[in-house]
Amino acid sequence: MARPDIVSPCIKVCAVDGETSLCLGCGRNKNEIVGLMKFEYDGRNAIMDLLPERLEKLRGLGKLEDVR
């Protein structure tokens, strides 16, 4: 059975913020970055749904000004 394409939020800006433990490029935490391929479809989608809010949080903390 063919595996569906896995969508990744990675934008090749891999820097994890020490305060929030979130990647400044995609908004994932270390466990989500490492384990993305291991999650089932629904688990990956659940993570993807959280990312806009996380990135907004990072913006609000002034963490993304130099990155984007």
Image (tube, helix red, strand yellow):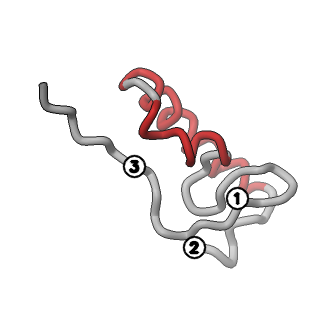
Q: Earlier in the sequence, mark 1 or mark 2?
A: 1
> Can you name the residue that lies furthest to the front here?
1
Q: Secondary structure at mark 3?
A: loop
Q: Which residue is mark 3?
A: 8
- Tag 1 residue: 59
Mark 1 element type? helix
> How many numbered marks does the figure carry?
3
Q: In screen coordinates, is 9 left or right of 15?
A: left
In three-dimensional space, the C-alpha distance between marks 1 and 2, rounded to whole angstroms, equals 10 Å
Q: Amino acid at mark 3?
A: Ser
Left or right position of 33 against 38:
right
Give me the residue at 46% from left, 29% from top.
Answer: 39
**Which residue is situated farthest in the right direction here?**
19
Q: Residue at x 87, y 54 (%)?
A: 19
Q: What amino acid is found at the position of numbered circle 1 in the picture?
A: Arg
The crowd level at tag 1 (other Cα within 10 Å; few <14, some 14-19, many 20+) is: some
